[in-house]
Amino acid sequence: MSLSQAEAVADTTVATEEVGGSLVAEAWRLLRRDKVAITGAVMVAVFVLVAIIGPWIAPYAATDRAGAVTPTTIPGPSSQFWFGLDDLGRDELSRVILGARQSLLVGVVSLTLGMIGGLALGILAGAFGGWVDGLVMRVCDIMLAVPGLLFAIGIAAMLGQSLQSVMIAIAVVNVPIFARLLRGQMLRQREADYVSAATSVGVRRRIIVFRHIVPNSVSPVIVQGTLTLATAIIDAAGLAFLGLGGSDPSVPEWGRMLVDSQDYLSGAFHLAIFPGLAIVFAAFGFTLLGERLREALDPKYRR
Amino acid sequence: MSAVANLLPSRGRAALLEVTDLEVVFRRRGRRDVRAVDGVSFSVDAGETVGIVGESGSGKSITSLAVMGLLPDRGCDVSGSIRFDGTDLRTLSNDQMRDIRGRDIAMVFQDPMSSLNPVVTIGKQVAEVLERHRGMSKDRARTEAAGLLDQVGIPDPDRRLSEYPHQLSGGMRQRALIAMALACRPRLLIADEPTTALDVTIQAQILELLKQLVAEAGTALIMITHDLGVVAGLCDRVHVMYSGRIVEAADRHPLFAEPRHPYTGGLLASIPRLDSARGTPLTPIPGSPTDTLPWARGCAFAPRCPNVQDDCLRSAPELRPLPVQGGRELRCYHPLPSLLLAEPVAP
């Protein structure tokens, strides 16, 4: 991701300036008729639902030995075990279902942390301008100069192997993206006529920033958030693949399931396929929804 | 230049706003400085309506922003004094300035479509001013805001309070903005082309409204415009600006009856008239406002002036008072002859 994505997202404010309050209603109307957006929304809904009710719908517990396996014979999909068994004889379907919660948790928590950090820095830079702006933006530039996953690996490795450190690592990677996006929007809004109008009747700076500038600047941030959920899920899997996931092996995690499947690829490739598909499914859902949300909020895409 | 200020017609008592030698220079690294306002002096008495007329780029809007203290801090040098009710606004801190804006001086902007925050209700935006300056509670401010909307002629104000700007027409929005500006009964209102973005019938209504409100509240009004028609119906005194300087200042009637500066004459001649024959072409001022001479080298209007002579290109004329009643000032070596209407004069 993410610079080009972030920049594309930045274009959406044109809408805010032109159609104003009707923007949300108009976007909602467009999204409801948009088959792709609905597909994305359904995929996201399925993912979230599975993550929440996973333990009740999974046929087996995560650590149950459901069937007999030997290292050379790992049964693939069958009518009893839809996704087959893994190398320790555990039900793959149950593990994929139970892994959803972990992915959603990492995605949502890291997104929230990243957004809070990014918005705080963005508001700081956008509201004060001058040297504060310069300082914040140079720090962001430095952070953005390091490739995202590499940066996350570094942070996760520094913080030690735990789920929390993965979340923090992904959050930190996203901070400069949100900060830059919001700051750019705020700079644009700061020149808006309604800001001059409010200033000309003596409205306080705090109120101008929080009531006038920020609410008009956040719509691209919301879009970016949806897209970032997708990348956060992929990043979490990537970190787990590299051995930086949660340390509790009894909690299924899609990324680690991929790692574990490596040794059996020739005999039991279903062990790689199903967690892989699960990651694709979740990330794809969020991406579809995010892209369409962006288009709905941007008059340039309207036909 | 301060000599000019002393020559300003004295009006018996201290003026409400007295701008003296105002100069605004935009500086950008690697570029030539732009002198947007160049030694402008004028005064506004309490309750008086003053027009500042000029084309785009003449510095009229920058003058008004300077009075409001709304020019950016960086890259922009302001000098001269802006005395409001005896205090030099330029010496005030940002916080003091914020207290004055909206309470004592307010402004109405050009484009009502973009001057209201699209995501905040009308009621909140009007009430905001009342809460800020009159310390009203939310409920009181809302009631008062409804009263204000009613006063500016917005029907069904209680319903409008909870509506968003896009639900209002352009004329309604400008009325709401006028309500915001006049909410605290400021002593001075600056209107920067308040009708340019509106269609003609609405323009007349808004001007009428402004005129009436200003008269009721005893508010002084500075009307910034490029439209002499607006000035004709509204202003007591008119300042004509060209390229950052005032070129002619006069009371309304003498100015229209007898424009002396060739630029004022040109502006008047370029207005379509009802009594001219069908098909008569308009008489534009030749050239464009970009064909100016820097004032340091002569008269800025010289490249477009029908009366231009050699001395116009050697040095800039001073703004001199004319020996007529009512106080009139002119910056021209070869003015249009007195008692002659705006006919282009052969050089």
Image: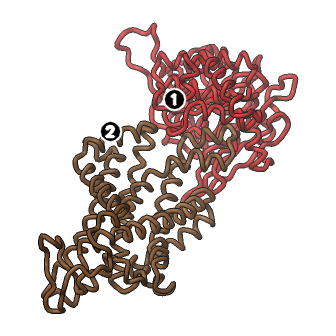
Q: In the rendered view, does A154 fall on the left or right side of B278? A: right
> From where the camera sits, is residue B193 visible?
yes
What's the residue type where badge 1 is placed? Glu
Q: Residue at x 13, y 74 (%)?
A: A77
* Image quarter of residue B280: top left
Q: Nearer the viewer, residue B223 or B125?
A: B125
Write down the colour of chain A. brown
Where is B141 relative to A213, above or below? above
> From where the camera sits, is residue B333 visible?
no
- Residue annotated with mark 1: B163
Image quadrant holding the C terminus of chain A, namely: top left
Disc ID at residue A29? 2
Asked if labels 2 and 1 share a chain, the reply is: no
Write down the colour of chain B. red
Point out residue A191 in the picture as x, y percentages from the top left corner. Answer: 54, 48
Point out residue A23 in the picture as x, y percentages from the top left corner. Answer: 40, 40
Q: Secondary structure at mark 2?
A: helix
What's the residue type where badge 2 is placed? Arg
